[in-house]
């Protein structure tokens, strides 16, 4: 793995260990519960907007797993060479 990529992953790993990251995830999970409610939808456009919000929240909530999986794959690929 080149140095730039190693720094990239290490910066993410530092972020994920931060208490602020854990706090952000909790806030995002709570927001997702509110956004996922259909009770206050006004129309179809509002539904599509909320769907987009939920997709973004899901990306953020799954970011740590995504980065860990990518790093593991990269590490396994490098080790198999």
Image (spheres, rainbow, N blue to C red):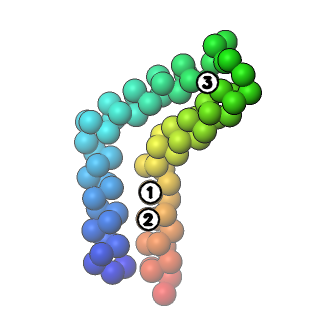
Q: Nearer the viewer, mark 3 or mark 1?
A: 3
| 5 vs 32: above or below | below
Cβ atoms at labels 2 and 3 below 8 Å apart: no
In this rendering, position of residue 70 left or right of residue 39: left
Cβ atoms at labels 2 and 1 below 8 Å apart: yes
Dot 3 or dot 1, earlier in sequence: 3
- Residue on which the image places disc 1: 68
Residue positioned 61% across, 24% down in the render: 36
Q: Circle 3 sits in a helix, a strand or a loop, which is it?
A: loop
| 43 vs 8: above or below | above
Q: Nearer the viewer, mark 2 or mark 3?
A: 3
Residue positioned 45% across, 80% down in the render: 78
- Residue on which the image places disc 3: 36
User: CA separation, marks 2 and 3?
Assistant: 31 Å
- Residue on which the image places disc 2: 71
Residue positioned 35% across, 33% down in the render: 24
Q: Where, by quadrant of the figure, is residue 13 drawn?
A: bottom left
Q: Circle 2 sits in a helix, a strand or a loop, which is it?
A: helix
- Name the foreground residue: 31 vs 16: 31
Cβ atoms at labels 3 and 1 below 8 Å apart: no
């Amino acid at each position: 793995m080149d140095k730039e990529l190693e720094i990239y992953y290490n910066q993410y790993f530092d972020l994920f260990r931060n208490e602020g990251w854990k706090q952000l995830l909790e806030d995002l999970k709570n927001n997702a519960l509110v956004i996922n409610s259909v009770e206050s939808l006004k129309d179809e456009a509002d539904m599509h907007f909320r769907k987009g919000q939920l997709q973004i929240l899901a990306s953020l909530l799954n970011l740590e797993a995504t980065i860990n999986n990518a790093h593991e794959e990269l590490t396994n690929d490098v080790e198999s060479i």
